[in-house]
């Protein structure tokens, strides 16, 4: 009697190889990684980031739901994932705007007290630590928003392609 599930067969492929090409898989992984980095910085530096922290954490949670609940299942739900990724991208934009404004304000405050053309800022003091936090969070948030927007375009394209192919079952 032949086994019901033959895992040794050469026809069995990994889930991502069947549904996504390697570049799309890399995009999904990069977006999840950027979301988790943004959420981590939002949690760790909530005292320095203020409202931007809430936006970052919300965007990270929404991205994790979109990817882990709707894209990495046996039959991906591209339509719902696109809606969640749109919300995550929208939430990441005010986070970047707020961290960028905080970075510029902190930099201007440091430069206001400068006496020469070269300004040395030590990370050990509060001004330097705040500047480093804002600069790093600003870069992570910008990368997160850009990668989320790229994944949103990909998922929306896949949704529209599947909808064109099979208009009745367009939720996939």
Image (tube, helix red, strand yellow):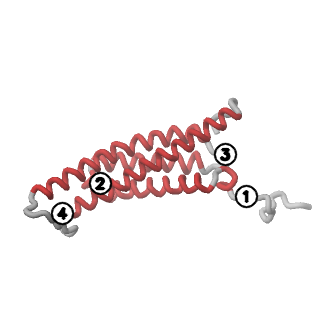
Q: In the rendering, at what x and y percent does residue 47 appear?
A: 25, 55
Q: For the C terminus, which image quadrant?
A: top right
- Disc 2/disc 3 C-alpha distance (Å): 37 Å
Q: In the image, which disc is placed on residue 162?
A: none
Q: In the image, which disc is placed on residue 75?
A: 3
Give the structural element (helix, strand or loop) at label 2.
helix
Give the structural element (helix, strand or loop) at label 1.
loop
Marks 4 and 2, the one that precedes in the sequence: 2
Label 2–label 3 contact, CB within 8 A: no
Residue under the image location 53 percent in, 56 percent down: 29
Return the residue at label 4: 126
Return the residue at label 2: 46
Between 38 and 26, the one nearer to me in the picture = 26
Q: Nearer the viewer, mark 4 or mark 2?
A: 4
Residue under the image location 13 percent in, 63 percent down: 117
Residue sitting at the far top: 168
- Disc 3/disc 4 C-alpha distance (Å): 50 Å
Q: Is residue 168 above or below residue 77?
A: above
Residue under the image location 30 percent in, 45 percent down: 97
Q: In the image, which disc is placed on residue 13?
A: 1
């Amino acid at each position: 009697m032949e086994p019901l599930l033959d895992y040794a067969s050469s026809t069995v492929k990994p889930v991502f190889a069947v549904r996504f090409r390697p570049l799309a898989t890399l995009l999904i992984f990069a977006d999840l990684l950027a979301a988790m980095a943004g959420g981590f910085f939002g949690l760790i530096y909530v005292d320095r980031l203020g409202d931007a922290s809430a936006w970052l954490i919300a965007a990270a949670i929404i991205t994790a739901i979109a990817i882990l609940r709707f894209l990495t299942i046996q039959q991906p739900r591209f339509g719902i994932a696109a809606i969640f990724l749109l919300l995550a991208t929208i939430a990441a934009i005010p986070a970047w705007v707020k961290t960028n404004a905080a970075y510029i304000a902190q930099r201007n405050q440091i430069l206001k007290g400068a006496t020469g053309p070269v300004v040395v800022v030590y990370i050990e003091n509060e001004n330097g630590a705040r500047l480093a936090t804002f600069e790093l969070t600003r870069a992570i948030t910008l990368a997160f928003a850009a990668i989320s927007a790229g994944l949103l375009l990909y998922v929306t394209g896949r949704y529209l392609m599947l909808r064109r192919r099979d208009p009745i079952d367009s939720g996939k």
